[in-house]
Image: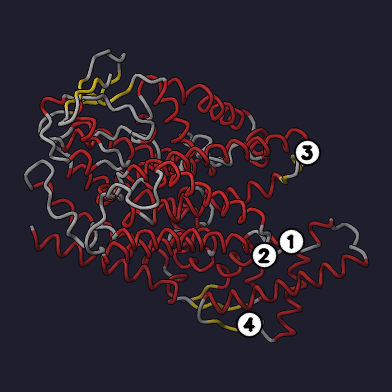
Amino acid sequence: MKSIQKTGLALFCIALILFTLLPVLNSYQLSEAALQGLKPTHKKEVLDILRSEGLLDREFGSTFTFSNAFKSSLKTAQIQLNEKAKTGIPDGISEWDYKLGDWELKGYTNEAVRAASIGPVADSPLLFLLLTFGLATLGGLLFIIPKFKEVEGIKHDGIYHNSMTRGLKLNIRSISLGLTILATIIYGFFYMNQNFFWPLVTSITTALIIALVYRSEKQTVGSPARSASPEFTGWLGMLTGVYLILFYILLYWYPHHMTPWIMMVDPVSRALSGNPASQWFLYGFMYTVIVLVMGIRMIAKYRHNNYQIVRTFSVMFFQTGFAFLIPEILVRLNQPWFDFKNIWPLNYTFFFDWNIKQLIESGGLGIFMLVWGIVLTVIGVPVITYFFGKRWYCSWVCGCGGLAETLGDPYRQLSDKSLRAWKYERYIIHGVLVFAVGMTAMVLYTYFTGSTQVLAFNSEVVRTWYGFLIGSAFAGIVGTGFYPLMGNRTWCRFGCPLAAYLGLVQRFKSRFRITTNGGQCISCGNCSTYCEMGIDVRAYAQKGQNIVRSSCVGCGVCAAVCPRGVLKLENGPDVDRTVIHISRDEVKILS
């Protein structure tokens, strides 16, 4: 069995190395054919510039050199067209079709890099799809399937000693967080065209939250020791985190450097929707494959627990069907791309003007999608959460939760269980919810009134900053890239506005709870170790208290790893009972 697993690991590593090297295999020719995606006026202007600079029909060895040269030509064309527009725009051409807008530069660059690609990946995309995704999937399955032959149950096989799953020392974790926040704010300044207001607001808010947490502790040092802070940093996990972070940076802000990867999945995209692949199709395809393969690993690990098996099949089903296949099939049928399980405010673009217009203009099915989304948000979320808690979505349906539970499962023990982390959690996640509600209110005001100005704020600028800060940096780069650094539910715990909405209902008006039998607890700590949401479950179990926390996603792993059956997930009316806590100094009635 070990030899099969080693073979699988070797195949996966080969596929990962090849995948990483693909962007350097293609070259790029800046010919007239590469400009086919440009509007006629823009194309003519850019062609003249390329000829004058001697760049036309020139071949480039990488996306970096190609994109830099092409962007420079686009910038020059933008300046010249804007100057010409002052003297008059030709008849029959609108101002927006004549001028070259900032928003078009990125799209033109992406299209040009793709059209200019020449080389092995461009010639044989299906071959490289098999050599990367195919080989990685085969390697992963060869590594996972032998686990079904092992004895059932959870084995503490050195998760805090393995370099991949050990996590970071406290000081390195703090440095990593600080650098991430600083880099995000600095990049955000340039992303917003050097508008300092929103980066400044974010900086002040961050400082305020830190001050509030430290003030509530009435101390600046001496916080309870944080869990998952090993003596030595897991460098292999840290490298994995860096790799994931770099991938997300390319995905959100520099997709033209991913062109060979995108072209590789083009045959799959054309088979499903009839359209060429985009970076989002690549991401959806990769996401689905990872959830399916790592879902099999999840089943192998927790196969002694029927709840975990059914729950894992559920996230695999919803990711494959609702998040990947159905939206692509809808596009083939000339309907809007729509994920029926994605709910506002997690789907923060749902109430954007362009989305509402697209759904209304799409006829009966589009209107149904709009009504479905509103009903699910306003009625479905509170009603279903009342009966089943937030687990119905966060642990059974959500794509973010599905990735966290499958790919992120090896890192669930890295969640910070300290009181300080819990305080940060409450301030940050509810702050994001308030931001999401405010931004959406501005967007709806703009849609119904036609004015982009709401008080002193421009709604388009606000939603751009929300998309950058929350939708990209937090949800993607930190949310997934920090799996090996801070645990698999960093986004769900600290950032997801939908999790905050669900959590408020669960905390104050829900029948869901985890009941405990304190008399059976042996204080082994398995439950707290494996809680991905940073809840000190053992503390509740020792006191015999029910666990009703807004952050709990009801994954049930705490119950699955308990050797004594102390914990039980229940949906039902709360039963009043008195809990007495006996310590060396006092006897205290808790409830």
Local packing at callout 1 (Cα closer than 10 Å; few below 14, some 14-19, many 20+) is few
Q: Which residue is mark 3?
A: 450
The label on residue 81 is: none
Earlier sequence position, callout 4 versus callout 3: 4
Q: Which of the two labelled residues, at mark 1 and mark 3, occupies the earlier sequence position?
A: 1
Task: Tell me the quadrant of the picture where the C terminus can be found.
Answer: top left
Sequence-wise, the earlier of marks 4 and 1 is 4
Q: Amino acid at mark 3?
A: Gly
User: Quick check: 119 above or below 220?
Assistant: below
| Numbered disc in front, either 2 or 3 | 3
Local crowd size for mark 2, using a 10 Å CA cut-off: few (<14), some (14–19), many (≥20): some
Q: Which residue is mark 1?
A: 101
- Lower position in the chain sequence, tag 4 or tag 2: 4
Neighbours of disc 4 within 10 Å: few (<14), some (14-19), many (20+): some
Residue depicted at x 69% and y 64%: 38
How far, Cα to Cα, is label 1 from label 3?
Answer: 21 Å
Given the image, on which type of amino acid does mark 4 rest?
Asp
Q: Position of residue 562 (x, y in %)?
A: 15, 35
Taking depth in this image into account, of 100 and 504 the one nearest to the observer is 504
Amino acid bearing label 2 = Leu
What SS does tag 4 mark? loop
The one nearer the camera, 253 or 341, is 253
What number is the disc on residue 57? 4
